[in-house]
Image: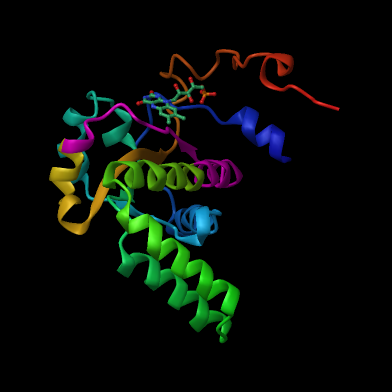
Amino acid sequence: MDLLDNLNWRYAAKTMNGKKVSEDKIERILEAARLAPTSSGLQPFEIFVIKNQDLKEKIRPVAWNQSVVTECSHLLVFAAWDHYTSDRINYMFDLTNTIRGFKNEGWENYRQMLLDSYPQQDAEDNFNHAAKQAYIALGMAMVAATYEKVDCTPMEGFSADKVDEILGLREKGLRSTVLLPIGYRKEDEDWLVNLVKVRKPMDHLVTVIA
Ligand SMILES: Cc1cc2nc3c(=O)[nH]c(=O)nc-3n(C[C@H](O)[C@H](O)[C@H](O)COP(=O)(O)O)c2cc1C
């Protein structure tokens, strides 16, 4: 199937059948998220992969009791940095230097520019910026899932504070941003599965300026 066929096949599954997704599929989905581009390459988020059923059961009530939270195979929690700190910025710039095996003056000047600005900015603004980057990875993961013929449901319907508490995210300098249960659709019971996909027409979405 080509990309657009895959994107038409995917939908936000409302119910899943509990069947396990193989670890190699999950790894490829996570790799797609890892490859997501991010602002300044900082990758300011982490992804928690919850396989533990008890933990999923704990999260479901704070996620509007949405059944996919417990019916999924793997529950991904995208958690963004709560702030841009010097340590976090330096880690990514040092990693780049290590992997590429050289230092570059322009790159070091850019590092300094970020160090002189990001950590001094408002933490909430920085978190919101980091969360946007996490959403790019979410998108990549969802597209990758279609290639694995695996369903997923992007979810903002949850209490971020409660999920942070359950997973101890604040202590790690992280805040939950969006959930992605991954599994297989329960085809015969999902009210959404056979409904026509609704998207606004292209001319309401795109303005071409020649
Ligand atoms: C960021 C985001 C948050 C969403 N939150 C939820 C959610 O909490 N529960 C849910 O059932 N669907 C959720 N959705 C699914 C959307 O409602 C769905 O993607 C949209 O209606 C389009 O339908 P489709 O994905 O089936 O094509 C969310 C989607 C996105 C992108």
Q: Residue furthest right?
A: 210
Q: Residue drawn 13% across and 44% down? A: 165
In the rendered view, would you say 32 is above or below 154? Answer: below
In the rendered view, would you say 92 is above or below 190? Answer: below
For the residue pair 24 and 64, the one nearer the viewer reads as: 64
Q: Is residue 42 magenta?
A: no
In the rendered view, would you say 100 is above or below 50? Answer: below
In the rendered view, would you say 28 is above or below 202? Answer: below
Indicate the quadrant containing the C terminus: top left, top right, bottom left or bottom right: top right
- Report if residue 75 is visible in the image: no
How many labels sit on residues? 0
Magenta-tinted stretch: 139-161
Q: Quadrant of residue 198?
A: top right
For the residue pair 98 and 86, the one nearer the viewer reads as: 86
Q: Quadrant of residue 53?
A: top left
Q: Is residue 142 magenta?
A: yes
User: Residue 103: horizontal and vertical position, in percent?
Assistant: 55, 83
User: Residue 39: horizontal and vertical position, in percent?
Assistant: 51, 53
Q: Residue drawn 54% across and 58% down? A: 35
Q: Is residue 155 left or right of residue 67?
A: right
